[in-house]
Amino acid sequence: MMFRAFLAILEIGSFWHVFPIVVAILAGTFIIYFAKSKLNRKQQVNLLCVLTVSLSLFVLLVPVYKLITHEFHIKRDLPLYLNNFTALIFPIVLILKKPLLFRILFFWSMAWGVQGILTPDVTNNPQSLEYFRYWIANLMPMVIVFYVLFILKIFPDFNSVFLSIVSLQIYFIIVMIINETLHSNYMYLNAKPASITVLDYLGPWPYYLIVMQFMLIPYFLLFYFPFYLLKKQSSSNL
């Protein structure tokens, strides 16, 4: 356990860990600034469509490429991890034009994205397809939800915190059924990942799953807290 943790510390903070995060921050900042200062409302929505569709296509094309190159494995390459699934349904949410769905995806994107950034479960080899899939699928949804926040002004509310958690439980159940059918480990619901993650500190299976459910409420509330303060400040200024 300690040896695994030591290896993980060596990888965390390395150039190939920090580099995609910095690129995402710079690219996201530029995209939001460009949309806010140069585009009208219709163009802003069109750019959001391009971002969401591009991300979804990338997530879909990776397993297709693996199928073509005979590298696909059904137990690990389906887009069932939360970041991949979120990427797939972004365009659908955009078509439905339901602000509540964007609010739910905000918590999903931030929760999984932050965990992916802090405890990366991927090789540090930038020549690996998995390296690009991991970082794009973790970071791009965060860029998109920040775009929605700053450009479309759709902010999460208190109710969406709990709706996000409830909908996530439903998704967990669906993935558990798929794992049972395929004997797979999507979302790490049957075993912890090989790399060191926060799950290593939550006890053995299945106890870490139970602890994780209790942690979701304060974790999601943490992401909501800045918007609570913003709302409170706006109310006091009236």
Image (cartoon, helix red, strand yellow):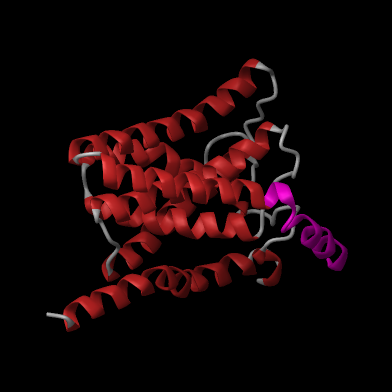
Taking 24 as reference, is 163 left or right?
Answer: left
Taking 30 as reference, is 48 left or right?
Answer: left
The quadrant of the picture occupied by the C terminus is bottom left
Any part of residue 76 in sight: no
Asked if residue 218 is positioned above or below residue 56 in the image, the reply reads below
Question: Residue 167 in the image: x percent, y percent?
Answer: 37, 56
Residue 170 highlighted magenta (yes or no): no
Extreme residue toward the top, this view: 68
Extreme residue toward the right, this view: 3
Q: Is the magenta stretch mostly helix, strand or loop?
A: helix
Any part of residue 91 in sight: yes
Question: Residue 102 in the image: x percent, y percent?
Answer: 30, 51
Extreme residue toward the bottom, this view: 236
Residue 14 highlighted magenta (yes or no): yes
Q: Residue at image x 50%, y 73%?
A: 214
Question: Residue 34 in the image: x percent, y percent?
Answer: 34, 42
Asked if residue 72 is positioned above or below residue 23 in the image, the reply reads above
Closer to the camera, 126 or 210? Answer: 126
Asked if residue 153 is positioned above or below residue 175 in the image, the reply reads below
Residue 89: name its quadrant: top left
Extreme residue toward the left, this view: 238
Q: Residue at image x 37%, y 74%?
A: 225
The quadrant of the picture occupied by the N terminus is bottom right
Number of numbered markers: 0
Highlighted range, magenta: 1-17
Closer to the camera, 237 or 135? Answer: 237
Q: Residue at image x 53%, y 37%?
A: 79
Residue 178: name its quadrant: top right
Question: Residue 171 in the image: x percent, y percent?
Answer: 44, 51
Taking 139 as reference, is 44 left or right?
Answer: left
